[in-house]
Image (cartoon, rainbow, N blue to C red):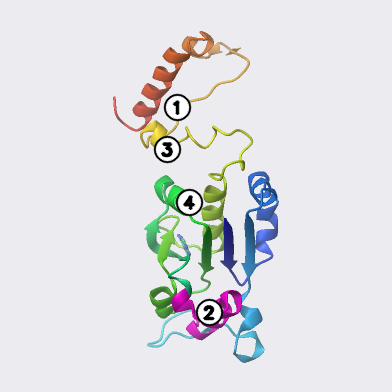
Amino acid sequence: MNIDVFTLFPHWFEWFRGQRHVANALALGHALECVDPRATTPLGAGQVDDTPFGGGAGMVLRVDVMEAALRARYGDDPVAVRSRRRVIALTPGGRQLDDALASELAAEPGLTLLCGRYEGFDERIVERFCTDEVSIGRYVLAGGELAAMVVCDTVLRKLPGALGHADSALEESFSPALEGAPEYPHYTRPADWRGWTVPEILLSGHHEKIRLWRLEQSRRRAGGT
Ligand code: ADE
């Protein structure tokens, strides 16, 4: 998988690239690259945004600037690019990210993530250049960068080999293996700490009983039985 993040703050992602599962994914041949629209802006003095028509606070990312950046990256009209790759605008009002969407995105060969700043994007960027709008929750961030990192984090950890343990991403919170429910509780040594003991069943070595107990715990956390 190759992920391109269009951001005015590419250096923010240097830290992110060093996180273990991200570094693992990159070592396996996946790519996470940043593209700075300021580098290809057709406007003077590195301008990328402008005041909103109709008035109002804040600045809006310009459509001509994003077109230039996408063209420079893909050598094609961005309107055509979106027919061959998922181009995602990070917006507070987009489709809410969940485990199913993360799995869907992890199955793509390539993703383009567009980070808005200030008041966000000129709507024509979203309408004409993007296939999706994704939100990481119903609150407003100062920009799309943290949201892009959240998307990359959950998508990259689903790629085979990114996590140390092959099974870790299979049976985890909200996965189909747990019927979409939160994960069951975990315990480790010591088995008794200040009289706070670990559920007996987990020490029993009885794999099938443990599996059923975990499933029941998971269902209970989902508000079921
Ligand atoms: N940009 C600003 N707020 C956001 C959010 N909640 N999700 C995705 N992108 C955003």
Residue 54: quarter of image: bottom left
Q: Is residue 71 magenta?
A: yes
Q: Residue at x 66, y 48 (%)?
A: 28
Residue 213 placement (x, y as % from top left): 41, 18
Identify the image quadrant of the C terminus: top left
Look at the numbered disc 2 and give the secondary structure of its residue. loop
Residue 95 placement (x, y as % from top left): 37, 58
Q: Residues within 10 Å of mark 2 (few under 14, many from 20)?
A: few
Q: Are marks 4 and 1 in contact (CB under 8 Å)?
A: no
> Mark 1: which amino acid?
Tyr
Q: Which mark is residue 184?
A: 1
Q: Are marks 4 and 3 in contact (CB under 8 Å)?
A: no
Q: Nearer the viewer, mark 1 or mark 3?
A: 3
Look at the numbered disc 3 and give the secondary structure of its residue. loop
Residue 37: quarter of image: bottom right
Q: CA distance from mark 4 to mark 3?
A: 15 Å
Q: Which mark is residue 76?
A: 2
Q: Residues within 10 Å of mark 4 (few under 14, many from 20)?
A: few
Q: Residue at x 39, y 24 (%)?
A: 215
Look at the numbered disc 4 and give the secondary structure of its residue. loop
Q: CA distance from mark 1 to mark 2?
A: 48 Å
> Mark 4: which amino acid?
Ala
Residue occupied by mark 4: 107
Residue nearest the observer in this picture, 3 or 192: 3
Which stretch appears magenta? 59-80
